[in-house]
Amino acid sequence: MKLTKQWLYRFVTARTLAVGVLALAAIGVSAGNASADWHSFWHKFHVDTARNNAWPDPFNEADARDTVAPFEVMKRNGWKLHNTIGHDLFREGDGVLMASGTNRVRWIATQAPESRRTIFVLKGNTHLETEARLASVRQTLSGMNLDGGQPSVAVTSVQPAKASGVWAAKISRDGIAATPRPQLPQTSSSGTQSAGVASGTP
């Protein structure tokens, strides 16, 4: 009976100690979590305060990038169309550049801004025709005395808008004809100046 009481006493004592240790551990973990949450709260508070005081500076650059991004896309697409060598600049059948196509390639390779010197070749009706066009453009570039590296050549399926030479010439002549004759100021006998038509043909 005495052994049973001692054993029961030891069992209860050990169990009580174990429960106490677990309780203290739980309290410590809870306190640690609360402390971490507290520090996280104050860190976020200081960050938000600094951001509000600096507004709108942290967001100006991002807004500026978002504003100009569509224009950069439009510029890139515009230069792509401008630098496209279309069907009418290649000889039909064998895909060799004509004289006008050679001049176009030379202008792109020498006069376009260095960052915009990629030459785009319009895809032919067949794979062989496209390859012949690429070979002709590369051969033309290899015969030029270029400053810096040789422009890259790529294939495109987007055909640029075009107009006939007759229509373009008519627009140019109509613009010249609609330009008013130049006028020079004239001084009258009273000394005042007035606009008058200059004598002679322009």
Image (spheres, rainbow, N blue to C red):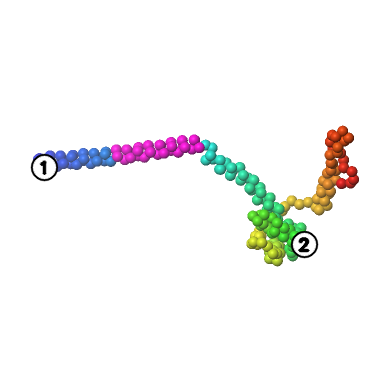
The one nearer the camera, 177 or 38, is 177
Q: Nearer the viewer, mark 1 or mark 2?
A: 2
Dividing the picture into quadrants, the one containing residue 185 is top right
- The type of residue carrying mark 2 is Ala
Residue bearing mark 2: 99
Q: Which mark is residue 3?
A: 1
The one nearer the camera, 95 or 136, is 136
Dividing the picture into quadrants, the one containing residue 26 is top left
- The location of residue 200, given as percent across then percent down, is 90, 45
Inspect this view and state whether residue 179 appears: yes
On whether residue 190 falls in the magenta region, the answer is: no
Q: Which residues are magenta?
A: 27-54
* N-terminal-most mark, 1 or 2: 1
- The type of residue carrying mark 1 is Leu
Inspect this view and state whether residue 123 appears: no
- The location of residue 95, given as percent across then percent down, is 73, 63
Q: Main secondary structure of the magenta part?
A: helix
- The location of residue 35, given as percent across then percent down, is 35, 38
Q: Residue at x 40, y 37 (%)?
A: 42
Q: Residue at x 28, y 41 (%)?
A: 25
